[in-house]
Image (tube, helix red, strand yellow):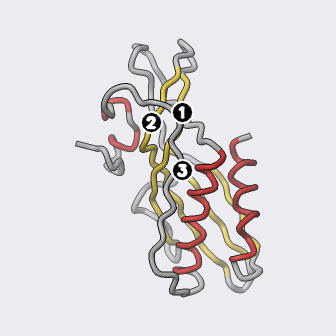
Amino acid sequence: MALKLWESSLQAKASELHEDTWHITITDSIEPHKQAHDWFQYISGSFARFACSLCKRSWMSKRVQVVFHFHLDKAKEQGTIKLRRFKQKCRRCNEAKMEDPNFPVENIDVLIERLVEKIRMRCYKEDLGEKNRPSVFNGRVNGPHESAHCEACRLGVCSQAS
C-alpha cells in the first residue's frame, strides 16, 4: 500500500522529468551518505504517524527523516529512485520493534515534489532556484523528540539528534 502512494505521487509529477521513465522502490538497504557511483542523494523530513505493532499505541512525529538515492540511465531513458523511510519504536514497550512511518498523502506529495526538483537540478542540470513547500502537520505532538527511539538519530541523520 505505501509503495503505491509514493509511486502514484511520482507519476503525477513525471511530466517534469523529460519524458524519461522513473520508478521508486522502498528499501531499508540504502545508507545515508553512501550512495553508489553516479547516484545522487536527497535527505528530507516530514510529519508522519507511527503505530506500535505490540501495544497498538500510536504517536506522531513532526520530523521523520527519509533518504532518497536516485540515478538516471540516460541511454535507457530510465530513472531509479530508492527510498528509505526511517523508523521509530514505541517508548512504552520493552521489546518494541522499529515501526515504519505512515505519511499523510499530502506530505508524500510534498516530499516527491521536493525530490523531483532535486532530480531536475542534478540529473537534467536545470536551474530552479530554491523553493521549499512545507509539509502539512495535523494534530499534536506530545513531548520532545526522543532520540533513543529514533532510527535516524542512531544513524546520525536526524535533524533533531542531540
The reply to whether callout 1 and callout 2 are in contact (CB within 8 Å) is: yes
Q: Looking at the image, which is closer to me, 94 or 92?
A: 92
Q: Earlier in the sequence, mark 1 or mark 3?
A: 1
Where is 118 relative to 33, above or below?
below
Where is 22 relative to 60, above or below?
below
Q: Give how far across and how far down residue 46 sits, in percent.
A: 49, 48
The residue carrying mark 3 is: 84
The residue carrying mark 1 is: 49
Disc 1 marks a residue whose amino acid type is: Arg
Q: Give how far across and how far down residue 31 sits, in percent.
A: 45, 54
Residue at 51%, 51% (x, y): give it: 135
Q: Looking at the image, which is closer to me, 143 or 79?
A: 143
Where is 136 relative to 7, above or below?
above
Tell me the element at label 3.
Answer: strand
Q: For the residues carrying marks 2 and 3, which lies nearer the camera in this image?
A: 2
Disc 2 marks a residue whose amino acid type is: Ser
Disc 3 marks a residue whose amino acid type is: Arg
Q: Give how far across and how far down residue 122 sits, in percent.
A: 52, 80
Image mark for residue 87: none
Residue 106 located left or right of residue 130: right
In this rendering, the count of numbered labels is 3
Residue at 63%, 49% (x, y): give it: 106
The residue carrying mark 2 is: 61
Whole-number angstrom distance, CA of label 1 to CA of label 2: 6 Å
Residue at 62%, 42% (x, y): give it: 104
Residue 100 located left or right of residue 105: left
Q: For the residues carrying marks 1 and 3, which lies nearer the camera in this image?
A: 1
Residue at 51%, 61% (x, y): give it: 133
Give the class, few, some or many, for how many residues have Cα within 10 Å of label 3's Cα (few <14, many ≥20): many
Tell me the element at label 1.
Answer: strand
